[in-house]
Amino acid sequence: MANIHRITRLSVTPVKGLQLHHPSSIELTANGVAGDRTFVLVDENGRLQSCTHNQRLLELRAAYDPARCHLTIRRGSDVVADGVIRAGGDVRVDLHGLRSVSATEIADSSWSKFFSDLIDKPVRLLRALEPAFDVQPATLIGTASSSELARRSCLGNIDARRFRMLIEFDTDEPHVEDSWDGAILRAGSAVLRGGGPVKRCAATTRNPEHGEIDLHTLRMITAYRGRRQTVLGPGATFGTYAEVLEPGTINVSDTLSVMK
């Protein structure tokens, strides 16, 4: 088993649930990537919203300039929302019952109205004051895992972007990342500890470009991997979590190595 791999893609988004950005470099801190999931949407009951049940979020792409507190939302090449974000009152956001993060309301209610009109239900846009990851600040998946899922499902290929993993890496061994629970990993200049499996949700069934459901990924995964136990309960698992032991810079084409 090769213990050195090449990082092939990084994935982040300023607004949780919107289309992903694929930067050439990220700064990974102990609490996640600076700028990733800076904004979240919650419904009237405070439940976190994502693309799982809201297809139209995947039509949009966000850009945020923290120096100017300026958020821009685009649909394709068209700007559909744009402006300065001003903080309102302090709130807490529950992340699937696992932990909560501090956040602020957005003073300008037009932002919440924009997203409410978009997905046809009342939601509030909040600015998280720390990265809004659920279980661990990093996730990893190997290229061979997506290839194996495609092979087992008699498909030519599967776009791994639908799994919305922070770090993708090149490997010939399907699901090698499953063997890294507790292992010490170096990704660029960051040091990670491999965690448990990621329980997948219906967001993976949606096309990463337009949000339509076009692949029965959960059924396909369990058809050959079964249901596995995770911190979120049993389910279809694909990819792994990782804890950040030492913050650092990670670039596309950097090595990801298993240290011990």
Image (spheres, rainbow, N blue to C red):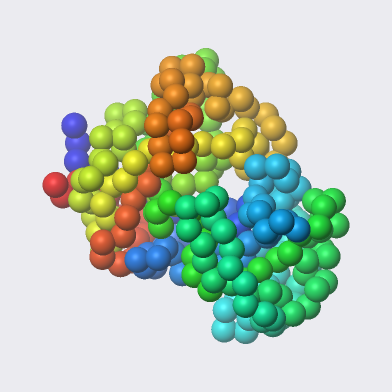
Quadrant showing the N terminus: top left
* Front residue of this view, candidates 246 and 152: 246
State whether residue 120 is above or below residue 250. Answer: above
* Front residue of this view, candidates 162 and 86: 86
Q: Return the x and y of residue 229 as percentages of the image width and height.
A: 40, 32
Residue 11 visible? The answer is: no
Q: Residue at x 54, y 55 (%)?
A: 95
Q: Residue at x 70, y 42 (%)?
A: 53
Number of callouts:
0
Q: Residue at x 72, y 36 (%)?
A: 212
Residue 112 visible? The answer is: yes
Q: Return the x and y of residue 122 as percentages of the image width and height.
A: 81, 57
User: Hey, which residue is sitting farthest left in the picture?
Assistant: 260
- 172 lies left or right of 108: left
Q: Residue at x 67, y 29 (%)?
A: 214
- 3 lies left or right of 74: left
Write down the quadrant of residue 43 in the picture: bottom right
- 231 lies left or right of 3: right
Q: Return the x and y of residue 52 as percentages of the image width and height.
A: 65, 42
State whether residue 235 is above or below residue 66. Answer: above
* Front residue of this view, candidates 103 and 140: 103
Q: Return the x and y of residue 213 as percentages of the image width and height.
A: 69, 32
* Front residue of this view, candidates 94 and 197: 94
State whether residue 186 is above or below residue 26. Answer: above
